[in-house]
Amino acid sequence: TQACLDAIEGASALNAVVTVTAERALDMADAADARIAGGDATAMTGIPLGVKDLFCVEGVRSQAASKILDGFMPPYESTVTANLWSSGAVMLGKLNMDEFGMGSATEYSVYGPTVSPWRAQGSDAKLTAGGSSGGSAAAVAADLCLAATGTDTGGSIRQPAAFTGTVGLRPTYGRCSRWGVIAYASSLDQAGPMTKTVRDAAIMLGAMAGHDEKDSTSADIPVPDFEAALTGDIRGKKIGIPREYRVDGLSDTIAKQWDEGAAMLRDAGAQVVDISLPHTQYALPTYYVIAPAEASSNLSRYDGVRYGHRAKLSAGDGITEMYEKTRAEGFGTEVQRRVMLGAYVLSAGFYDAYYRKAQRVRTLIKRDFETAFADGIDAILTPTTPSRAFALGAAAEMSPVEMYLNDVFTVTLNLAGLPGISVPSGLSADGLPLGLQLIGKPWEEGDLLNTAFALE
Ligand code: GLN
């Protein structure tokens, strides 16, 4: 814990950690020592973790990297973090992210951008650590913590993991409680572990997961021993390679690593087959209708009355002016864009054309996966991202739609509620990490982790 706190102090240039809870960390580490001495430890006891700023931690500033939650100190603890603390894990602090989880570069944050610890060969240009869990990914990659929590609504665990050479697991929707995780898009949000290895992800998921009465969408099914599933034996497993993921603009190196990953699984005794997920091309537009729709509804609670920031008002301003001024000052541009987009697709005149249509397509996308699994496929192998990490600041030059294209491989499984993992697959031509994604069957994270273990 002390080594991590020192590392955090020395790595302020990364801007990965936004709140350090040093005193609490050292107290928790002492308690962990006592627990270990008492013979009552779990594999997580004494493990120093970083927590994405989206998780409410009692008495610790939790702002979802937004000005609108300025100084918000939750009077309660998210279930996932409560589970981690009861396993004996140690809290080091809160990690940077895109405001409310909206973004792919951790540049849309009230705390300023996170910088990746990686540099391309022969270049000093600062790179993104991905987003929205970019602070978590950078902190794990730079050894500021042993692991971190992330959330994944449309790739925010897997894409930053791919960009930083770390492992990121998004569990089945309902595996981890969403209670106390600040909401972005409730039907897509899911918390998960960001770690250095597949084994760490298996251990940490076991500590995070479980049924919770406080979240009606959390599943009442047992949490198996995920670590025990890591046998490395994948003989007879059937791995699907979806042809629709060979998109234009996929880098040659990534295409090559995808083939090599398939070959590794084949060598380990799996059967690798081509499959089709015919509605893949509609996933991105579907996601960017549904996620903003849910966001506009979830974010309506930030009104200047109940939490955080409230705009200074002028004489004669009424309640409407208070809402308008507070929300205009409190939300960043990307969040405002999503709220407007969401309100538009939910509005009476456009609901059928956009929102209802998107829900229908979502069902078709889900069915594509169900069909593949019904045909005997155990897991699906794809790249995590179409390119390596881009330069910091590139987001400002990209159009919003170009930015959204980054999520082309990751959003599909969120729409279907499925688990997915990104594992490091090697380096780009200029020496930057890349990742491969495995998509698994619902509730089969053990199997998924074991396949990822064979790829590691
Ligand atoms: N880039 C996606 C978005 O902005 C990622 C969201 C997420 O998983 N939190 O919506």
Image: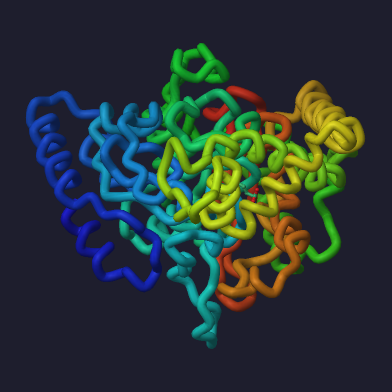
* Rendered view: 249 above or below 98: below
Image colouring: rainbow
In the drawing, does residue 52 fall left or right of residue 261? Answer: left
At x 63% / y 67%, what residue is drawn? Answer: 388
Image-based side of 115 in relation to 332, left or right: left
**Residue 317 seen by the camera:** yes
**Residue 428 image-quadrant placement:** bottom right
How far across and how far down the image is residue 145, in percent?
Answer: 31, 53
Residue 197: tell me if it is visible. no
- Tell which residue pokes out farthest to the front in this image: 316
The residue under the point 65% across, 29% down is 187
Is residue 241 or residue 30 the one in the foreground? 30
Residue drawn at the location 85% of the way across and 31% of the way down: 348
Q: Position of residue 107 (x, y in %)?
A: 54, 64
Residue name at image x 43 percent, y 47 percent: 69
Give the x, y percent position of residue 82: 32, 29
Closest to the observer, 243 or 96:
96
159 horizontally vs 9: left or right: right
